[in-house]
Image: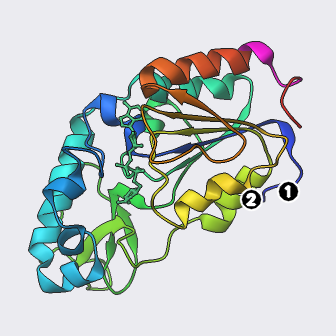
């Protein structure tokens, strides 16, 4: 991606998303009732320790999530976010590992927690695109190490953080949707926005208050995101808070 200007630009919009933006596409969130971390112990299926202990269990956990994501369709929230690119310079920073933003038409998506459609060698780190295909034990990267999901597990380093932070710091508008803001350092990104930026947070409920300076829209992504997008497209690039 091209180097990021630090100066806020009236045309720059960053969308920071979490699993809630894909909930209405049928994909599970993590911490709500019925969420993935209510069904599975993350230590067993989403950590280097779990991988060392039982790699076949970890592979199957992500094979199932990859299959579900491939069968899911982008929803009205994903599509509205993609529509913003008509008039704005948009970067989507997502904690999600599905590719629904891309399949809805977003062209600049930073996955800070990895991507289901990629695998990588467990020792080489060599990435390869696998789409919806499962990863099996014995499937090796070109350098001979076992393929693993290209996912950032608990305890591993987040991806694209500096680049994502620079985008947020140069945004005239920041839309945060579908995240409990409970996992760091990803959640700290929302505090990098300029004080003058127009900041909106969309979630049905929050643990605690919305971050300082944010307008909180209490609702679902497919209802609220199109409303915010319509407002911003209508206002254009002149009225942004910069
Ligand atoms: N529309 C908008 N928001 C929704 C919807 C919806 N239809 N349904 C649920 N939400 C909100 C919930 O209210 C909650 O605030 O989405 C959020 C989901 O929070 P989490 O389950 O904690 O998911 P997320 O914030 O994406 O988790 C962050 O944690 O385990 C790690 O790597 C994993 O990327 C993930 C990270």
Under 8 Å from ligand 1: the CB of mark 1?
no
Comparing 111 with 34, the one in front is: 34
Specify which label sits upstream in the sequence, 2 or 1.
1
Mark 2, Cα crowd under 10 Å, few <14 / some 14-19 / many 20+, is some
Magenta-drawn segment: 234-238
Comparing 71 with 187, the one in front is: 187
Q: Where does the image place residue 158, in percent across and percent down from the top left?
A: 50, 70
* Image disc number at residue 6: 1
| Magenta portion: prevailing SS class | loop
Q: Quadrant of residue 238?
A: top right
Task: Answer with left or right where residue 36 lies relative to residue 114.
Answer: left
**Residue shown at 63%/57% (left/top)?**
189
**Residue shown at 26%/42% (left/top)?**
69
Residue 133 seen in the current view:
no
* Image disc number at residue 166: 2
Q: Where does the image place residue 120, in percent across and percent down from the top left?
A: 34, 72
* Image disc number at residue 157: none
Comparing 231 with 114, the one in front is: 231
Do the residues bearing badges 2 and 1 touch, measured as CB atoms within 8 Å? yes
Secondary structure under the numbered disc 1 in the rendered image: loop
**Residue shown at 25%/43% (left/top)?**
28
- Mark 2–mark 1 Cα distance, whole angstroms, equals 6 Å
Task: Answer with left or right where residue 115 lies relative to residue 173.
Answer: left
**Residue shown at 22%/35% (left/top)?**
71
Q: Where does the image place residue 45, in percent across and percent down from the top left?
A: 20, 69
Secondary structure under the numbered disc 2 in the rendered image: helix
Q: Quadrant of the C terminus?
A: top right
């Amino acid at each position: 991606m091209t180097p990021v200007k630090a100066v806020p630009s009236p045309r720059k919009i960053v969308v920071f998303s979490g699993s809630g933006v894909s909930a209405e596409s049928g994909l599970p969130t993590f911490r709500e009732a019925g969420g993935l971390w209510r069904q599975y112990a993350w230590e067993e299926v989403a950590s280097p320790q779990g991988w060392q202990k039982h790699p076949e269990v970890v592979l199957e956990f992500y094979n199932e999530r990859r299959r579900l994501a491939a069968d899911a369709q982008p929803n009205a929230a994903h599509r509205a976010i993609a529509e913003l690119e008509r008039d704005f310079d948009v970067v989507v920073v997502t904690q999600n590992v599905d590719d629904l933003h891309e399949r809805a038409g977003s062209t600049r998506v930073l996955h800070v927690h990895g991507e289901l459609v990629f695998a990588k060698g467990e020792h080489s780190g060599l990435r390869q695109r696998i789409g919806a295909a499962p990863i099996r034990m014995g499937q090796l990267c070109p350098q001979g190490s076992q393929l693993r999901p290209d996912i950032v597990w608990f305890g591993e380093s987040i991806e694209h953080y500096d680049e994502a932070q620079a985008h947020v710091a140069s945004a005239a508008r920041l839309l945060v949707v579908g995240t409990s803001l409970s996992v760091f350092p990803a959640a700290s990104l929302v505090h990098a926005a300029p004080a003058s930026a127009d900041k909106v947070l969309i979630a049905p409920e929050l643990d605690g208050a919305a971050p300082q300076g944010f307008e909180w829209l209490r609702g679902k992504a497919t209802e609220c995101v199109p409303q915010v997008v319509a407002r911003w497209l209508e206002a254009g690039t002149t009225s942004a808070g910069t």
